[in-house]
Amino acid sequence: MSCTISVGFGLQCKDGIGGIKKIYLNAHDLFAGQLTIDGTTQEVSASASTSKVFEFILPKSTGSFTEEVASSVENGTIFYTQTVTASFHKLSYQRRKQLELIAKNRLFVIVLDNNDNYWVVGYEDGAEVTAASTMTGTAKGDMNGYTITFTSDSKNKAYRIEDGVFASDFSIDTTPLV
């Protein structure tokens, strides 16, 4: 890989928004090595896996995806920490049990952001649940539900899935848990 800088950035239009709409999850081992990464764009251009991903819809303004670079000048290393945080309203035994199963897995996570971009988190080594909270709230207007955090350390930045590939190449289970 060449480390030669090839282009600069211009000032962009102010048309992007923050936050995420949905996440899609399943066990990492079902997807390991199953994505085709375009060598030029570094985007996911196809998926060979027929495994399904499960859809989790987030309440508005309750989820985020961040990616931070970790670099060691002394060791000549660089990696990226990808973090997804999601909240789900309403405590129930069904949700508690499903979140417990999720926490016990190494995961393949796809994030749909509010700009309709799909991002793959945990592609190389999987993502892990690194924090989870169950809360009843104190006041009547407080959140009653769950917040969960997924973290992955990766040698590459999160891959974006090319437009149209997610809908055509992934099996999506949209059956909601009550």
Image (tube, helix red, strand yellow):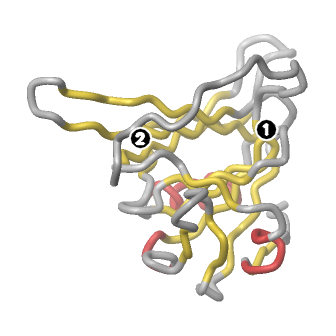
Q: As displayed, is residue 30 above or below residue 106?
A: below
Q: Which residue is mark 1?
A: 89
Q: As displayed, is residue 86 above or below residue 52?
A: above
Percent from the top left, x then y, of residue 157? Answer: 48, 45
Circle 2: is it few (<14), some (14-19), or many (20+) Cα within 10 Å?
A: few
| Residue type highlighted by circle 1 | His
Q: Quadrant of the C terminus?
A: bottom right
Percent from the top left, x then y, of residue 129? Answer: 45, 47
| Viewer-nearest residue: 9 or 42 | 9
**Residue 65 quadrant:** top right
* Separation of residues labelled 2 and 1 (CA atoms): 20 Å
Q: As displayed, is residue 130 above or below residue 127?
A: above
Assign a secondary structure to mark 2: strand
Residue sticking out furthest to the top: 139
Circle 1: is it few (<14), some (14-19), or many (20+) Cα within 10 Å?
A: some
User: In the rendered structure, which disc, 2 or 1, sits on the residue that comes first in sequence?
Assistant: 1
Kindly identify the residue that appears in the image at 33 percent across and 54 percent down: 1
Q: Which residue is mark 2?
A: 130
Assign a secondary structure to mark 1: strand
